[in-house]
């Protein structure tokens, strides 16, 4: 039984884990940088330790300082949240070597699935459908093989994510140069320029399956999340269940995810991500070996407490729920990532003082955030301010509730993406559920064309 848990993260996810600890009767330890001294997670935790300057490289990414904080406070376990060191196998190994519990997958699983080439090979061995692509590392010598896939193709970094090192190549002539640029970007972002190449799936949906696996061989796969509303491969809106997934496809995806988890010896919470093409065929993308930002939609739809389950699994308990319960659909849930960005200026980051704050509430309305009035959003980290999660009896009602909740959200002092979320929800394609991962790009292109046409019309009138 764990009594004290250190949260090696910040912001809303640190707050979320602290609250789970409190409900389970466990003490929590927050770590923070000098730039986060006034953050809510510092005040909520039972103890808090400063681990360095504002820069992530000197604080949240410093394994030695996090381990020192655990030793000083007597923490028995470390929850990594998401981002930072959450999928770092060296960190998980260092935690175990200090006799502490890492609340997450094993170092081997983190290593296996942190390398997307290795992950593809594992998925292939498990009989999980793959997008046709290169086997192993893609290099200049493979150009002939890549060309045989047929254009367009997608170049991807073997390490990391978030769109870094990701490029679409539509013709043979630009392949070599594009691979060189992608490799350089991946090297700068992740310290590893290794690439692989996949055939580009035409206008897919991005659908993922949440898994939980205990130390006794038990695995469950929850109802899917649809994460197709993205900008530059960064998710903006997630929902569950997906309007594009039939019960038969859901069952097949869940079976594939469970097979992958069991055969790879996975333990903990994780997400198996797929592309779903317009014909209903799905293909493995990757495994995110951690808690996802969008985990609340699964919690609302299924009734599972994923963070509590993570902690119980780390304590050696068996899963509390079976596959039937994980597959139950209690409502339709939608999550909105509210970022400190200005859509009118190309989604430029907008850190600064929160002059006033009003959070929506009411039936089926949840807000996960670390914000408060008077808080200054620092410029050093991810722009995520809050996650607004709504649930209702069906998708139409959930969209209506989202619009109501977004209209009640008031954040002054900085720009946010809240109004843009309303723009997406009011688009007929989103309303009908007939959209894909290009929806946001299409909306922005249409808005730009209208603005240019209006400007041209104004110029003609003045002339």
Image (tube, grey):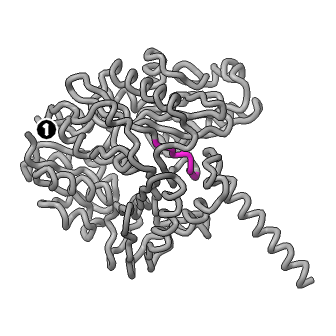
Q: Residue furthest bottom?
A: 462
Q: Position of residue 428 (x, y in %)?
A: 67, 57
Q: Residue at x 52, y 28 (%)?
A: 248
Q: Position of residue 110 (x, y in %)?
A: 33, 31
Q: Residues within 10 Å of mark 1 (few under 14, many from 20)?
A: some
Residue 59 showing in the rendered view? no
Give the extent of the magenta segment. Answer: 225-231
The quadrant in which the C terminus is found is bottom right
Query: Is residue 47 placed above or below 81 in the rendered structure?
Result: below
Image position of 123 (left or right of 366): right
Residue 272 showing in the rendered view? yes
Q: Residue at x 65, y 33 (%)?
A: 201
Magenta-highlighted stretch: main secondary structure?
strand
* Residue identifier under label 1: 100
Task: State which quadrant residue 277 falls in.
Answer: top right
Image position of 129 (left or right of 442): left
Query: Is residue 296 placed above or below 427 in the rendered structure?
Result: above
The quadrant in which the N terminus is found is top left
Q: Is residue 118 covered in magenta? A: no
Q: Secondary structure at mark 1?
A: loop
Query: Is residue 139 placed above or below 273 in the rendered structure?
Result: above
Q: Is residue 229 covered in magenta? A: yes
Q: Position of residue 170 (x, y in %)?
A: 74, 35
Q: Residue at x 32, y 60 (%)?
A: 11
Q: Position of residue 225 (x, y in %)?
A: 46, 43
Q: Nearer the viewer, residue 442 or 106?
A: 442
Q: Residue at x 43, y 17 (%)?
A: 126
Looking at the rendered structure, the number of numbered marks drawn on it comes to 1
Q: Residue furthest front?
A: 393
């Amino acid at each position: 039984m764990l009594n004290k848990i250190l949260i090696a993260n910040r912001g809303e996810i640190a707050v979320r884990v602290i609250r789970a600890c409190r409900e389970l009767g466990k003490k929590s330890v927050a770590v923070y940088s000098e730039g986060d001294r006034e953050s809510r997670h510092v005040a909520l935790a039972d103890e808090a330790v400063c681990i360095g300057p504002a820069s992530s490289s000197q604080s949240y990414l410093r394994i030695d300082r996090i381990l020192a904080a655990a030793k000083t406070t007597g923490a028995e376990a470390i929850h990594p949240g998401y981002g930072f060191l959450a999928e770092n196998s060296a960190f998980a190994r260092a935690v175990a070597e200090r006799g502490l519990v890492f609340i997450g997958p094993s170092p081997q699983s983190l290593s296996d699935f942190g390398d997307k080439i290795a992950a593809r090979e594992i998925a292939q061995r498990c009989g999980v459908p793959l997008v046709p692509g290169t086997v192993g590392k893609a290099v200049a010598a493979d150009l002939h093989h890549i060309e045989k896939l047929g254009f367009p193709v997608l170049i991807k970094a073997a390490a990391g994510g978030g769109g870094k090192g990701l490029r679409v190549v539509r013709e043979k002539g630009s392949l070599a140069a594009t691979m060189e640029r992608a490799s350089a970007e991946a090297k700068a972002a992740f310290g590893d320029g290794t690439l692989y190449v996949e055939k580009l799936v035409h206008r897919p949906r991005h659908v993922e399956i949440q898994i939980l696996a205990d130390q006794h061989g038990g695995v469950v796969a929850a109802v899917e999340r649809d994460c197709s509303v993205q900008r530059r491969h960064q998710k903006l809106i997630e929902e569950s269940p997906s309007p594009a997934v039939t019960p038969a496809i859901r069952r097949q995806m869940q079976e594939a995810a469970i097979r992958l988890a069991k055969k790879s010896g996975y333990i903990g919470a994780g997400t198996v991500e797929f592309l779903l093409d317009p014909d209903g065929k799905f293909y493995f993308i990757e495994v995110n070996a951690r808690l996802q930002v969008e985990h609340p939609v699964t919690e609302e739809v299924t009734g599972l407490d994923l963070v509590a389950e993570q902690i119980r699994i780390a304590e050696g308990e068996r899963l509390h729920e079976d596959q039937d319960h994980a597959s139950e659909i209690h409502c339709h849930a939608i999550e909105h990532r509210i970022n400190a960005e200005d859509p009118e200026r190309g989604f430029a980051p907008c850190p600064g003082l929160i002059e006033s704050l009003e959070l929506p509430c009411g039936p089926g309305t949840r807000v996960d955030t670390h914000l408060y009035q008077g808080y200054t959003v620092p410029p050093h980290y991810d722009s995520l301010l809050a996650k607004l999660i709504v649930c209702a009896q069906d998708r139409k009602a959930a969209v209506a509730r989202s619009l109501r909740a977004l209209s009640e959200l008031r954040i002054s002092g900085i720009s946010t993406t809240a109004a843009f979320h309303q723009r997406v929800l009011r688009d007929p394609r989103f309303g009908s559920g007939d959209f894909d991962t290009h929806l946001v790009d299409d909306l922005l292109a249409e808005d730009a064309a209208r603005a240019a046409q209006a400007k041209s019309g104004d110029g003609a009138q003045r002339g």
